[in-house]
Amino acid sequence: MVKEQAHTVSSYEQQLSQLRGMMVAMGRLVTQQTEQAVAAVVEGDTEAGRTAQALDPQVDQLERDIETLAIRLLALRAPMAGDLREIVAAMKISGDLERIGDCAASVAKRALKVDTVPTDVPAGALRSMGRLVQENLRRAVDAMSQQDSARAVEVWQSDAAVDELYTAMFRELVTYMMEDPRTIRSCTHLLFIAKNLERIGDHATNIAERVYYAATGEMLPTERPRGGASVR
Amino acid sequence: MVKEQAHTVSSYEQQLSQLRGMMVAMGRLVTQQTEQAVAAVVEGDTEAGRTAQALDPQVDQLERDIETLAIRLLALRAPMAGDLREIVAAMKISGDLERIGDCAASVAKRALKVDTVPTDVPAGALRSMGRLVQENLRRAVDAMSQQDSARAVEVWQSDAAVDELYTAMFRELVTYMMEDPRTIRSCTHLLFIAKNLERIGDHATNIAERVYYAATGEMLPTERPRGGASVR
C-alpha cells in the first residue's frame, strides 16, 4: 500500500514536471517562430520565413499534448491551490502561445508578398516594433518558466510601448499610401504585419497576466497601462 | 454523513448547472455585441456601435467568473470523463467568446472612423460577411448550449465561406484604394473591420471544434476545409 502511494505521488510529480517541460518547449518554439518571422520581414530573409511557417504544426501539436496531459493530471489527483492554478494556467497559456505561432507564421507568409520594404521610416518602425515584441515575448516566456510574478508585471507594463509603435506605424503607412498609390498593395501587407506583431505583443501580455495569477492567486488590473491613441 | 454526501452531490450539480448557465449568457452577450457591431458598420448605426462597446466589461467579467467557478468545480470533486472535458472546454471556450467580444467592440469603434461606407461592392460584401459571421456564431453558441456535435461540424465546415468573402473584400478594397487615393483612410478601416469579422468567424469555428471534442472525446481534423486563396 505504501509502495502504491509512493508510485502515485511520483507519477503525479513526474507528469507535472513533464507539463512544465512542454510549456517551456512551446515557449521556445514560438519565440523562435517570431524571431524568424521578423527576420523575414525586416531583412527579406525568405529562408527564415519558411522556417517560421514550418514550425507551426509542431506548435499546434504541443498545444494538444499539453491539454491532454493537463486533463490527465486533473483527473489523476484533484490538485489544489497552487498546483491547480498552475495546471489551469498552462492550458490557457498554451492557447496564447499557439496563437502567437499563428501570428508569426502569418507574418512570415505575408513577408513574401511585400515587394520591397520602403527603406525609410516604415522599415525602421517595423524593425523597432519587431524587436520590442520579441523582447516582451522572451520575458513573458521566462516569467512563465520561472513562475516569476515580478517579471510578469514588467511585461504587462511594456504593452503600452508596443501599442504606441503600432499606432505610429499605422499613421505613417496611411500617409505613405496617400502620397504614392503604387505602394498601396505593399503597404497594406505591412499594415497587417504590424497588426500581427501588435497581436503577438498582446498575447505575450495575456501570458504575463496568467503567470501573475497562477503565481500569486491575484489578478492584475483589467485596465492595462495604456498608450496609443484610439485613432488607429 | 448521508446528509453531507447528498449536499455535496447537489452542490456539485448546482455549480455545474451554474457554469452552463454562465456559458450560455456569455454566448448571448457576444452574439449581441457582434450584431450591434455589424449594424454600426453597415447601417452607420452609432447607437448600436456604442452598445457593442458598452457590453465589453460585462463579457470580460463573465470570463473571469467562469474560470473561477470552473477551478472551484475541479477542486471540489475530481470530475471524470464527460464532465471533466466539459469543464475544461468551458474554460477554453470562454476565452474564445471573450476575444469575439473584443473583436466586435473593435469593429464598433472603427465604424465611427469610416466616413462613409462606399455604396457599391465593398458595402455589399461587408454586409454579406457580417451576416455569415453572425450566423456561424449563433450556431456555434447553440451547439455549445446543447452540446450538439453535429451542429458543431456544420459550423466547422462553414469557416471556408467566411475566408472566401474576406479574400474577395481584401482584393476589392485594395483596387478601390488604388483607383481613388482619397478613400485610403476609410478603406483601411474597412480592411481591418473585415479582418476582425474574419477573426470572429475563426473563433466561432474554434468554439465548434472544442464543443465537438467535449461532446465526443474526439478531435475534428486539424486542417479545416479550406477556402480563400492565400493571396490576401
Image: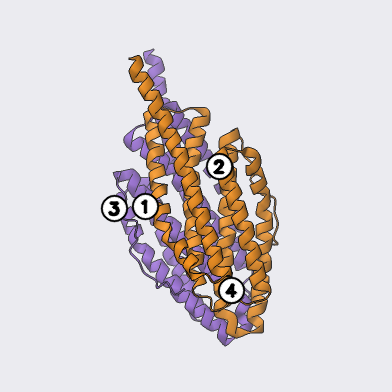
Chain colours: A orange, B purple
Residue A113 locus on image (x, y percent): 50, 75
Q: Circle 2 sits on which residue? A: A144
Query: Which of B218/A148 is in front?
Result: A148
The three-letter code of the residue at mark 1 reads: Glu
Report the Cα–Cα distance between label 3 and label 2. Answer: 38 Å
The three-letter code of the residue at mark 4 reads: Thr
Neighbour class for label 2 at 10 Å: few (<14), some, many (≥20)? Answer: many
For residue B209, the mark is 1
Vertical side of B172 occupied by B219: above or below: above
Q: Circle 3 sits on which residue? A: B150
| Label located before the other in sequence (4 or 1) | 4
| Label located before the other in sequence (1 or 3) | 3
Query: Which of B123/B69 is in front?
Result: B69
**Chain letter for mark 1:** B
Report the Cα–Cα distance between label 1 and label 3. Answer: 11 Å
Same chain for the residues under marks 3 and 2 in the image: no
What is the tally of numbered marks visible in this picture? 4
Left/right of residue B175 with respect to residue A73 in the rendered view: right
Tag 3's secondary structure? helix
Report the Cα–Cα distance between label 4 and label 3. Answer: 38 Å
Quadrant where the N terminus of chain B sits is: top left
